[in-house]
Image: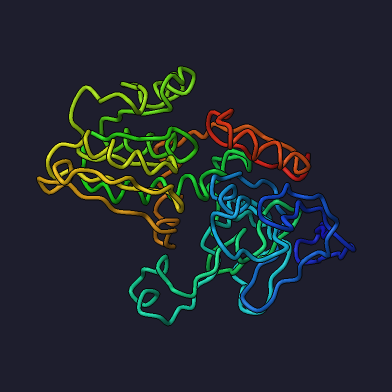
Amino acid sequence: MTKTSDTPRTRVHYPGMRAMILEKPGTRLQPRICDAPEPGPGQVLVQVCACGVCRTDLHVLDGELPNPKLPLILGHEIVGRVLGTGPGAEQFIPGMRIGIPWLGWTCGVCDACRAGRENLCPRARFTGYQINGGYAEQTVADARYCFPIPEAYSDTEAAPLLCAGLIGYRTLRMAGDAKRLGIYGFGAAAHIAAQVARFQGREVFAFTRPGDIAAQDFARSITGGWAGGSDELAPEPLDAALIFAPAGELVPTALRALAPGGVVVCGGIHMSDIPSFPYEILWQERSIRSVANLTRRDAEEFLALAPQIPIVTTTKPYPLSAANEALDDLRHGRLSGAAVLVPGN
């Protein structure tokens, strides 16, 4: 692996690094010693200090997101220290702590990019999907999509901010000025979005799997308000509903919970099929919309806002070698908050 000497700009090369590799969708990750990456033009070489485990990683692992780069290093909630840079990325100096999110590269010239909507770039590439990610000791990233991490957070605390936080923030923005907010699926993204919503003066209602008392208790500890199963109705009609669980059947459920003019915002990159529903529950100007990826503006705004609230992330650390265990715990709902891999452990 690569280390820095006492002089921050000096790099010492080592022959390899540890990584957890996806060789084929539907299989478990395999521990490997890989060649250490080298930064190209406009890229930053990073020593990974922590990497969050996201439900999107499960979607890639399970083949629900098609055509990943193979073999692949998963992980797109990366916090690390700069080891070196390629030409054109000199704004980052060795030793700086930065975060690397899901959106890893865009063309910069299409209509979407020029309009500040690079999250919709048709040529976009994504960290831990088409670009090797952070389930490793080192990674490289496009300097345009690297962001300084607030000093208020440890590496482990900061990792969930890079996807759960950013997607939760963008999903919340899509709810407009909704005052009564329902959140379906109270995991990593929800527990951060709920804190932002409360800071903004919104009332938050949390919906979990029916009968999941532990998740409802966790939700109440964050929201300070009502929590129940997704088979229940909130005490009041909702102005907006945010869906983070990848369950399409929650869309008509959330529509039924809305007041006239309300919106359902689907925050996940993948969701099971939405069942048919009667027009009656969409009528009265209710709407459904989705969230795609993130923009640099989202990252800049949210990472500046997080320490002001302050956002508190609930995390469970795992050593890099336990990546499969962390993914299994996420899959089976055994986590409150977010799993985070710590390669140094």
Q: Residue at x 24, y 43 (%)?
A: 277
In the image, taking residue 5 as reference, residue 278 lies left or right, namely left
**Viewer-side residue, 191 vs 324:** 324
* Color scheme of the displayed model: rainbow
Q: Residue at x 89, y 62 (%)?
A: 14
Q: Locate residue 241, reporting x and y percent.
A: 28, 39
| Position of the C terminus by quadrant | top right
Q: Where 212 sits versus 60, above or below?
A: above
User: Vertically, is 135 above or below 259?
Assistant: below
- Image check: 229 left or right of 263? right
What residue is drawn where x is 70% and y is 48%? 49
Q: Position of residue 195 (x, y in %)?
A: 38, 34
Rendered residue at 75%/39% (across/down) = 322
Name the spot of residue 84 as percent of width and height, x first: 72, 67
Relative height, residue 282 to residue 39 (above, below): above
The N terminus sits in image quarter: bottom right
Task: Report the number of discs.
Answer: 0
The part of the image, by quadrant, that contains residue 47 is: bottom right
Residue 126 image point, x, y percent: 55, 63
Q: Looking at the rendering, which quadrant does residue 199 occupy?
A: top left
Q: Residue furthest left?
A: 284
- Drawn side of residue 260 relative to residue 184, left or right: left
Between residue 311 and residue 178, name the one nearer to us: 178
Q: State the image quarter where residue 328 is shown.
A: top right
Q: Is residue 331 above or below residue 28?
A: above
Which residue in the rendered view is the most extreme toward the right?
A: 15
